Amino acid sequence: MNRFLAVLLVLFSVTSAPLLATDTIAFGEFYKQSVLGIKLTPKLVGLAGKQVTVVGFMAPPLRATGNFFVLTRQPVSLCPFCNSDADWPADILVVYLKEDQTFIQRNRPLAVTGRLEVGSYTDQGTGFVSQVRLVGSHYEDQ
């Protein structure tokens, strides 16, 4: 009986490992410059629909409580939505969380994991438009 349980445990860990694995992508791997402008990279497009982890900084949120925030490559001191177009960060990622939470401004990197969505999307609640976002996400300090 113990041998049977050990075999089951090994089989479960081997077969479930790919289900739990996540890919990583860096902000520098989102876009490439071409003569036609900025395009999504093949890596980014290839990861669409998959669980991915991105490391970055939480931009100051619009509200103290909510279910989304903006992740940036570098720390920003102002809300990216409150700046002029000239100050708009080039590398941002909208992060939709699994549930509402109260935000604490962290001044250190976060590792954010969620399902990557690629393509134009307009948030019905806020009107914000994004090209790249993580949904069903969670994060932890890096």
Image: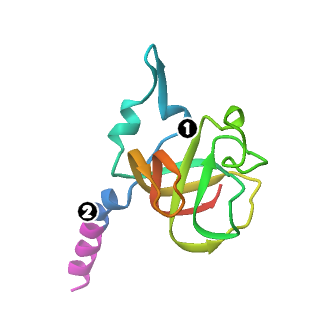
Relative height, residue 87 to residue 10 (above, below): above
Badge 1 element: helix
User: In the image, 77: left or right of 70?
Assistant: right
Amino acid under label 2?
Answer: Thr
Q: Earlier in the sequence, mark 1 or mark 2?
A: 2
Q: What's under tag 1, amino acid-wise? A: Phe
Q: Which mark is residue 73?
A: none
- Is 63 above or below relative to 86? below
Identify the residue at image location x=56%, y=74%.
100
- Residue 41 among those drawn in magenta: no
Quadrant of the rendering where the C terminus is positioned: bottom right
Q: Position of residue 118 (x, y in %)?
A: 39, 44
- Residue 15 x %, y %: 25, 62
Q: Residue at x 27, y 69 (%)?
A: 12
Name, please, the residue furthest toward the bottom.
Answer: 1
Labels 1 & 2 near each other (Cβ < 8 A): no
Q: CA distance from mark 1 to mark 2?
A: 31 Å
Is 16 located above or below residue 59 in the figure? Answer: below
Residue placed most toward the observer, 29 or 97: 97
Q: The magenta stretch spans which residues?
A: 1-12
In front of the other: 11 or 124: 124
Q: Main secondary structure of the magenta part?
A: helix
Q: Which residue is mark 2?
A: 15
* Direction from residue 57 to residue 36 in the image, left or right: left
- Residue at point 45%, 13% (across, down): 35
Marks 1, 2: nearer the viewer: 1
Q: Which residue is mark 1?
A: 27
